[in-house]
Amino acid sequence: MTSPIEPPRVRLAHASSEPILELRNVDFCYPAARRSAAEVHGGSRLNKINMSICPGKAHGLIGESGSGKSTIAKLLLGLTAPQAGQIFFDGGLLTPARLAAFRLRVQPVFQDPLDALNPVTPIGKQIIAPLLVNFKMKSSECQSRLAAAISAVGLSGDILGKLPHQISGGQAQRVNIARALILDPEVLICDEPVSALDMTVQAQILNLLSDLRETRGLSLLFISHDIRSVAYLCSEITVLKRGSIVESGSRDQVLLDPKTDYMKTLLEAVPNSELGLELSSISKRSRPAERRDLPVVR
Ligand SMILES: Nc1ncnc2c1ncn2[C@@H]1O[C@H](COP(=O)(O)OP(=O)(O)OP(=O)(O)O)[C@@H](O)[C@H]1O
């Protein structure tokens, strides 16, 4: 494990095509659902999930509510274990012995940014908490890492003494991302990280995630109901339906040439004009090639 006082690693994106994080033939069922015949074929059961997150890439996970997206996030964070199949991280099987180190290198960003913060602890203390807890560092030893983390997410130092109710939702999500970055992880598991935010702030957070991927070589799992955000951020997309993968491939394969009626229906829910407008409005850079590749939804 890298020492927490070293500067953040800048990983070479695309340096390796081997997945950094991978589910192989994973089955999972919540205990309550195991007892309920009605749930057996529903999203409470994940069936033979194969999914790879490659270094420096953003992988989008979409599917209707209850299809199992957050359950996959929990598996990829090591918060729950599969009943069958395996999880591989950085080329090796994720065993119980590797779990503690793994959890430092794969960090979550959740949907409700204020919910994820302690309401009575100043922001600065919350961002450095992972260093205090995991590496027994003193607060004074964390200051350069703290400065780097808030700068990486576009926050200024005056936020550090504030309490969560004194900051906006967008700032709170930046704080959550800074808290994840302070451990210098390789992977961020982002479970609906923008859906609680208003449209303009969503765009800012998407751009931030995109920049972090590009500049630090971070690998991302990005879960969203919003195909427009996934199309903007992700180069790979997996589509889940009732606990099973129904489509998986490059963004263009999945969005331009959907194989299943399910994916076609999901795309029909996104008006083409809105998709184009949304993408151009959330893009801070001109990305004509990507706009040309937008799915034509009739
Ligand atoms: N702790 C749990 N115990 C039992 N069943 C659960 C638990 N958590 C989720 N489920 C069930 O598992 C299924 C998949 O839930 P999950 O949260 O993974 O779906 P999702 O695709 O993320 O949904 P959403 O988009 O609404 O967040 C649902 O049927 C849900 O009710």
Image: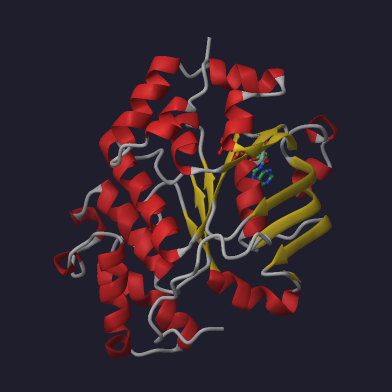
Residue 234 or 136: which is nearer the viewer?
234
Which quarter holds ligand 1? top right
**Residue at horizontal 61 percent and vertical 17 percent from the top:** 265
Residue 9 or 121: which is nearer the viewer?
9
Residue 64 visible, this angle: no
Q: Position of residue 30 (x, y in %)?
A: 74, 48
Q: Is residue 167 left or right of residue 203?
A: left
**Residue at horizontal 76 percent and vertical 45 percent from the top:** 32
**Residue at horizontal 40 percent and vertical 52 percent from the top:** 209
Residue 221 visible, this angle: yes
Q: Position of residue 168 (x, y in %)?
A: 23, 49
* Image height of 243 relative to 255, above or below: below
**Residue at horizontal 39 percent and vertical 42 percent from the top:** 194
How many marks the image carries: the answer is 0
User: Which image quarter is the N terminus in?
Assistant: bottom right
The quadrant where residue 175 appears: bottom left
* Image height of 257 relative to 149, above or below: above
* Image height of 161 relative to 66, above or below: below
Q: Position of residue 147 (x, y in %)?
A: 25, 75
